[in-house]
Amino acid sequence: MSAMADRATASRIIGEAREPARPRATPSRSRGNVLFVSRQRIVGPTNGSSAYLLDLAQAVRRAGFIPHLLQPSPDLIGRWPWLHLGPELGVFASHRIRGLVRLGRWVIAPDPRIALAALRGVVGRLLRRAGCTHPLLADRPRPYAIAAPWTARDRAFLRQGQRIAPAVVIADYAFQTPAFAAFPGVPAAVVMHDLFHRRDGGGEDSVALLSKEQELALLGQADAAIAIQSAEAGFVRDHLPGVRPLLVPMAVRPAPAPQPGADDRLLFVGSNTAPNVVGLRWFFDQVWPLVRRRRPAALLDIAGSVAAAFAGGGPPGVRFHGMVPRLAPLYAGAGVVISPLTFGSGLKIKLVEALAHGKAVVATAITLQGVEDMCAGAVAQADDPAHFAEAVVALVQAPDRRAALAAAALDRARRHFSPEACHAAFIAWLEEQTSPAKARC
């Protein structure tokens, strides 16, 4: 039985949904509506998964379709009682979030318990920094909304999506594929992001884990799986013959020229996820002392929310910048971009970003998973501390060598990660699903 036939027999959705803010105006003529269903916290391209989803939505709009975003869980707001949405969210013709109040670009949680939890978290953080260690002050992360069990209210909210009569439904992460039951007969795709059953962070991963069987069951509800790199597309091809794998890497807009940067300047960019945190700890403990021994003036700049995991700061020579409004100046000044990941799956989007900026990169094999062939000769790979340090030192002290590697990196970005190259299979599938010939079948 096909995935669409399976969904057609699913139970009907029950319950009432809260009416959201009025959707934005949409073009009068289009090739159809494409509905994205997501429970991740999206305020802009602030992390890899959000940037990738927004990239797909941009591709949908450029192809003449109208993207919409439906978010059935208020838990995505996390521990803070408000969110400020970036202008990138304007790609969606409508954007609805259950249980939250929308005021322009601001999203506010009306539940006072969230504000109280935020206040408790801020006070606790300040007291911990002051040396207090009482158990009541322990950090209490909010549940991972993306993987939370679906509630009756979540399912009822999907009626909001039925109103736009989507031509295609796209689930953001495998955990969202149960939403397909609300749209029987509508072609459906799932954005994989990762293979969760392959994540292994020694118990330190920040997201839910799935068994292989559970993940196959979720992915198998889709007609197509959008894979960000070739290894994951191959997994779908090998294990789910009824699901079409669509290889859709993250698209970038390459810099006009390579940027070899300055001697002794390193850069790491990443969000506060377990692969980034564990990788940086490994680099601090095992690699950075070797680099500084040979290059005492070396400096490492770190941008992104990963700084939150290192409240005590880093070793000498490390500077945490946190979230920055523009990464371009940091990329331009860095001589070497590092990606010392020791576990994780999916395409490492910050790797692609570094290639697009025309940078010399030192990365582990984990970082290069799925793009090894594309990056051969354009990224310095090293997996043990001594070789990683040696690769860094060789580049930070040699502008000519950096320039050559940076040029190769920019060439790979232009050839393999342009929007035209990345989105072709995805757009072809959308056009196939919405063609008049298919509608007559």
Image (spheres, rainbow, N blue to C red):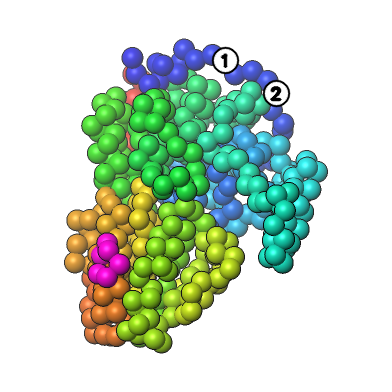
Q: Is residue 44 above or below residue 78?
A: below
Residue 160 location (% of width, % of height)? 62, 30
Left or right, 328 with respect to 362, comes to right
Residue 389 location (% of width, % of height)? 30, 73
User: Mark 1, residues whose alpha carbon is within 10 Å: few (<14), some, or many (≥20)?
Assistant: few
Q: In this view of the protein, which residue sits in the foreground, 117 or 81?
A: 117
Q: Which residues are magenta?
A: 382-387
Left or right, 424 with respect to 168, comes to left
Q: How many numbered discs sit on the rendered protein?
A: 2
Q: Quadrant of the C terminus?
A: top left
Residue 348 location (% of width, % of height)? 37, 55
Q: Is residue 298 above or below residue 280?
A: below
Give me the residue at 52% from left, 36% from top.
147
Q: Secondary structure at mark 2?
A: loop
Question: What residue sits right under mark 2 in the picture?
Answer: 16
Q: Is residue 140 above or below residue 44?
A: above
User: Which image quarter: residue 255?
Assistant: bottom left
Amino acid carrying mark 2 in the image: Glu
Q: Secondary structure at mark 1?
A: loop
Give me the residue at 78% from left, 42% from top.
113
Amino acid carrying mark 1 in the image: Arg
Question: Badges 1 and 2: C-beta atoms under 8 Å apart?
Answer: no
Give me the residue at 66% from left, 39% from top.
74
User: Which image quarter: residue 285?
Assistant: bottom left
Question: What residue sits right under mark 1 in the picture?
Answer: 12
For the question of whether residue 32 can be seen, the reply is no
Q: Is residue 386 magenta?
A: yes
